[in-house]
Amino acid sequence: MRFRFRSLESRIATLFLVLIVAVQVVGLLVIQGGIDSNARAAIGVELNNGAKVFRRLLEQNAQSLRFGARLLARDTAFVAAIGNNDESDRATIESALANSGRRIKATASMLVSAERKITATTSEAQSAGLEKLVMSMLDQAEASDGANGIAVVDRYPYQVVVMPVKAPIVIGYIVMTFPIDGQLAAEMQSVSGLHTSILTRDRQGNLLPVASTFGVPVISGLVQQLRAAPARPDAPFDLDVQDARYSVRQLLIGEDAGQAVTVLLARSIDEAISEYARLERWLLGLAIAGILISAAVSVFTAKRIAQPLTLLADTAKRLERGDYKGQIEFKREDEIGALAQAFDSMRDGIAKREQEIRRLAYWDTLTGLPNRAQFVLHLNDSLAEARKRESSVFVLMMDLDRFKHVNDVMGHSFGDALLRQVAGRLQLQLANRRNTSAQVARLGGDEFVVLLPDTALEQAQLIAREILAALETPLSLEDQMVDIGAGLGIAGYPLHGDSAEAILSAAEVAMYTAKQRNDGAVVYDAGFDKSSEQSLSLLTELRNAIERNEFRLFVQPKILLDSGKAVGAEALVRWVHPERGNVFPDQFIPFAEQTGFIRVLTRWVMEQSAVLCRQLAEQGIALKISVNLSTRDLMDQDLPVKFADLLAQHQLGPGSFCLEITESAIMDDPVRAQNTLERLHAMGLELSIDDFGTGYSSLAYLKRLPVDELKIDKSFVMNMEHDIGDTKIVRSTIDLGHNMGLRVVAEGIETEAVWRLLARMGCDQGQGYFMSRPMPAGQLAGWLEQWRPPIALAGSGAVPAALAE
């Protein structure tokens, strides 16, 4: 490009000198030919560069839009709402789509499920028109973590962005559409100086003007000329625009089902050659003034024309290399000056956009802290410095306690404000220590991390304790006091790894260990990974146990204490391992709850209990089977549907079951738990609060729950004949349950004296070893035939009056 501009300068100077010597007419003809040729060449270059600039604008716009869609796809609450697969979360999903689309000015937002069906949208009309194109983009979006394309809906063009939602597998796709309209055309004109028109061509070949920097009458005339003109592949051609001649180039930017989107770039030929026409007039005057004056002026004029273009070409090359610092040194009021200003504006615009993209890529917009990508860069730099100085680097990774509960109860805006306060408190804590090299970052969600370069392990542990102490101080937000703590993991170089990835992984393992142990700050130990391997092995064995039918259903009868009649049985599970033998529930139930396998196990117990209930009914035995539900079960919004299907499959009524829930399971997520319990109760299923008295639930909350039964924990029952304190607790619980209109059941009855004492207190039902130990489900019918309660249940017994009263 530089060589061509130099050649132009030489030709102009030479041509001016030849005009003085040669015949004026011949010189003018030569000049006119040169002017036209160079103007056409310059216009061709401008149009060619304009095409590149427009495609670059489209790509930058698509990248920005994909980033906006990616933010929504990685939003924890949005992913959780999709994963719940519940109708009640539909409003949340649609609101998130609408809000996110509004922030990045999308005309339509939609959610496509993993089964490739549109499940939510902000524009039904656009969704119908885009469905075929969107479905064709899903595979590319999943493979490349996002895809974009061009669509035509009702003859209007749109950029379409598809972003997969992963948790960690793909559970859906976010689709957003953005109009290709006058704003883009105006931006293109401001960057390149070219008139820009956006057109669509339908399947019949008809053109529709969408947007243009020309006026409406002008673009309509252009469309008429284009319809009459023969098709041109990609070469510039001339068109008349309001008595002016323009060089025009058509650029195909996308096709959709036989419809095409083209961009018309137009450069005024008159404007391009206006500088040269003025030069022609100068040459006539110079020819009269004389050869010497003409020679001097010709050289000066040639440089005046060519040098700015050379400077602009150099500026364009610097922009291409990513150098946005250089200033354009000259100021002119003509077209070249306008071109220089356009270059200057383009440089500033590109620089600002790249700066914003870099900020979004490396900084957390919510807290203003570095994000994971930026933190990894800092960690790598610290590791490199530590290797040179033979020092150590430590990382503190923390995950807030109870944040999900706060987020669900108080709302996401409250949760965001809480995260900002936590970020500020972490920064203040490090600033108070005057540790200028320490850095805080937010990894995502409620996870934060602190980088401690050139720090020993003991110092890192001290800082960790100070941070935990700072977080334990209640936060004040919107007149609310929030108690929040954290589990914190510590790992560093060279003790636990020599790469950023290894150290972060070790810190994360230590953090989760700290949360499991409720142990504050924990330093990474290789044994943690072995524990993880053992957990993974246990999970595999549990899955195999279901497939190999290694689980057994056991039951323990529930007896009316006033008459001794058996009215129900609690369903229990036992694991008969082929190598370990009988595995007790305490050894695998907590792990199953932690990993989510408890849902599979609950489903198995429900199935086996339904089979048992059907078999007993066929023998004329009517018993209510009690099935235990865990926290994970209560979070399953499909649980009522699963129970309904089970009852229909085995032809059982809802009165055949009583579902037992612990206080802690209810209080983990009270809002969702109450919703699930109300739906189950509406079906006719009875509900029971198990192990009552061992949790920390609010009675004001419990009274709102649709429960039918309270089960007194066996820890209060087993020793009540010898402990007056336990007796008072049991008596109070029975009275409380009856006052709330609930049936009261006592667990852990191991002696006849305890039975009689509970009966005199008015307890309704009981279960325990005195009546029967848990037995295989197949033995229940035989036990019922042989069961004989103690005589004179309502009579006096050898029970101390102090305990019974």
Image (spheres, helix red, strand yellow):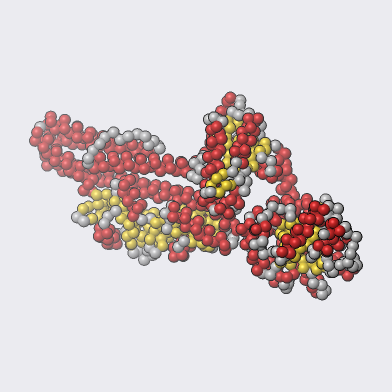
Question: How many tags in the picture?
Answer: 0
**Residue 488 placement: quadrant:** top right
Q: Pick the quarter of the image with the C terminus.
A: bottom right
At 65% from the left edge and 53% from the top edge, which residue is drawn? 668
Q: Is residue 66 left or right of residue 471?
A: left
Q: Is residue 491 above or below residue 679?
A: above
Position in image of residue 625 (x %, y %): 77, 66
Position of residue 497 in the picture relative to residue 434 (left or right): right
For image coordinates 30% across by 42% down, the residue present is 342
Residue in the image at 53% along x and 47% along y: 477
In percent of width and height, residue 334 lies at 22, 41
Q: Nearer the viewer, residue 727 or 444?
A: 727
x and y, in percent, of residue 538 in the image: 74, 49
- Residue 762 drawn at (x, y percent): 80, 64
Pick the quarter of the image with the N terminus: top left
- Residue 295 visible somewhere in the drawing: yes
